Amino acid sequence: MPSERKFQELTGSARGTIREALSQLEAEGLIYRKDRSGWYVSPKPVTYDPTRWSGFMTYVAEQGRVPATETLQVKTEKQPPAVLDIFGKGVRNPLYRVERRRSIDERPVLVEEITINPALAPGLARHNLNGSLSSVLREVYGLAVTRNHVEMRACALVRHTAECLGVKSGTPGLLVIRTSYDARGRVIEYDQEYWCANAIRIEVDLTVA
Amino acid sequence: MPSERKFQELTGSARGTIREALSQLEAEGLIYRKDRSGWYVSPKPVTYDPTRWSGFMTYVAEQGRVPATETLQVKTEKQPPAVLDIFGKGVRNPLYRVERRRSIDERPVLVEEITINPALAPGLARHNLNGSLSSVLREVYGLAVTRNHVEMRACALVRHTAECLGVKSGTPGLLVIRTSYDARGRVIEYDQEYWCANAIRIEVDLTVA
């Protein structure tokens, strides 16, 4: 974008007014500062509609963008009671944890932690998880999702998550938690996605029946 | 909550570890710092499901909480082309702008700017707007909403908005934009809500048909 000085010349407004306007746009995630080189327009966010079934690889591609997934870590880890509760009775520690980073047009936009019950998908780590995990679970393990529960809240990206995404600690984020169940009510995937806030826009359209 | 020192004693963990855990909980909006008096647990967020039709006054009360609305300002104001475009062809400047602050259990949680076409609701400012605006539009002006388009994105609360909500500038927020249409496709309400991020949780449940 033009420099603050240039904006002053173009508009005849005071420096303070220009700064106020820029900081408002920054708060809304529409522009960002890079190092000391000035202001840049944020890439267009992708639209995510939680009432549709398609996964990241599909809905990003549908919007003419290039999705990519990188598996950072697959581990077998003891989970706290709060996580075991989500999986319900009979689930036994430890569970699988898959950490992945996903990008749009080569820009990292989210880091996710997916928890999976090894009893349902033994040997999961041996498969290629750099694509749609749901496809692997369906095609290799015969696990079909029939219900999704999606929860979202704004958060700040800090520490490890901020580092993985290459953003400053404290950058606005959006936490999307998706719990997927099969027809028998078993939890197939418990996915916690930490998004760069300015990379995602939620959209829901609702019409009277 | 207990002091950081107390946590150290209770858990035997290093100060740095305690601080890291607290700052993670803060980033997720679960706890917050007040002045210099220590850490406090955030009030439970309300759940908002964009696939349901009920308004703020209804869904907050349904969750056993006490909603309140305060009209801060009603003005007639010239809107920029981007806003006029939303209202579509034939709409004429100026439009109504209603600024309201809404609270849950006496804590301010959102500030909203609602834009309304005066041609559809002449004399709107004469009515009591400290409740459900949709009810006023329906009962007084016969305007019935048949379609809602909801858009959400994480943002930072700054300046005027942060002041109105009594939070520090830069506090994580959630911007909820709702455009309501009637059966003829006319925009009845264009509502921009700036929420304290930790006061709201979005939840959508989706089952295969």
Image: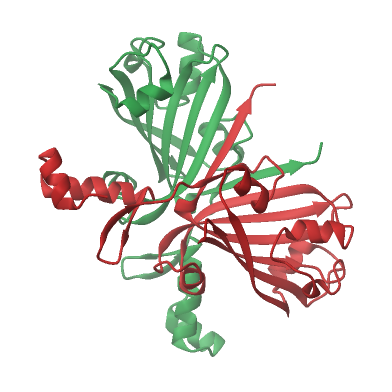
Chain colours: A red, B green
Looking at the rendered image, the quarter that the C terminus of chain A falls into is top right
Q: B18 or A146, which lies in front?
A: A146
- Above or below residue A13? Residue A86 is below
Residue A1, position as x, y percentages in the image? 27, 50
Q: How many marks?
A: 0
Q: Is A188 left or right of B12, judged from the image as shown?
A: right
Image vertical order of residue B78 relative to residue A34, above or below: above
Asked if residue A180 is positioned above or below residue A72 in the image, the reply reads above
Q: Residue at x 87, y 68 (%)?
A: A90
- Horizontally, residue A167 falls left or right of residue A184, namely left
Between A86 and A38, the one nearer to me in the picture: A38
Task: Give x and y (percent) for residue B86.
Answer: 42, 24
Front-lying residue, B182 or A98: A98
Question: Residue drawn 10% across and 45% down?
Answer: A14
Which residue occupies 44% across, 85% down?
B16
Residue A98 image offset from top left, x and y in percent: 69, 70
Query: In the picture, residue A17 is in which quadrant?
Result: top left
Q: Residue B128: which quarter of the image?
A: top left
* x, y percent for residue B95: 32, 19
Evaluate whether residue B205 shows in this view: yes
Instruction: Let me know if residue B43 appears in the view.
Output: no
Q: Is residue B200 above or below residue B138?
A: below
